[in-house]
Image: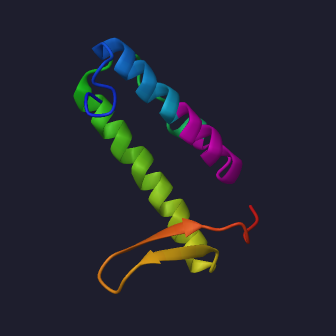
Amino acid sequence: MGTYWPELTPLNRRNQLYKIWERILELLEQQLEGVSTALPIPEINAPRSELKAYEDALDATVCAWIATRALDGFVDRYGDEQSAIWIPNNNYTT
């Protein structure tokens, strides 16, 4: 968190992180109904280890959703033969 918002206090950094997580959940909820219930954001005073575990679970969920889009052919690939990322494109439906 300090890397992204070095000028903020630790509490304000955490608040920024929670805003981003909330936005990611909002967008995921549009694709995966119930994800917000399945992945509740930790309490604001949760230990850093709990935050890391949550971040990992959220990341895994995003990756799994993108994988389903890739299997259905609804992603654009960016990269080369050794490294690439897949971004969902506008040709899919929920």
Q: Considering depth in this image, is 38 or 82 the residue closer to the camera?
A: 82
Q: Residue at x 37, y 82 (%)?
A: 80
Q: Residue furthest front?
A: 7
In screen coordinates, is 30 left or right of 45? right
Residue 43 included in the magenta stretch of the image: no
In screen coordinates, is 12 left or right of 94? left
Q: Is residue 65 visible?
A: yes
Residue 31 included in the magenta stretch of the image: yes
In this view, 45 is above or below 52: above
Quadrant the C terminus occupies: bottom right
Q: Main secondary structure of the magenta part?
A: helix
Q: Position of residue 1 (x, y in %)?
A: 30, 30
In this view, 48 is above or below 63: above
> Range of the magenta residues?
22-35
Q: Residue at x 64, y 74 (%)?
A: 74
Q: Position of residue 6 (x, y in %)?
A: 27, 24
In this view, 62 is above or below 66: above
Could you say which quadrant of the image residue 47 lies in?
top left
Q: Residue at x 61, y 47 (%)?
A: 28
Could you say which quadrant of the image residue 84 lies in?
bottom left
Q: Considering depth in this image, is 39 or 5 the residue closer to the camera?
A: 5
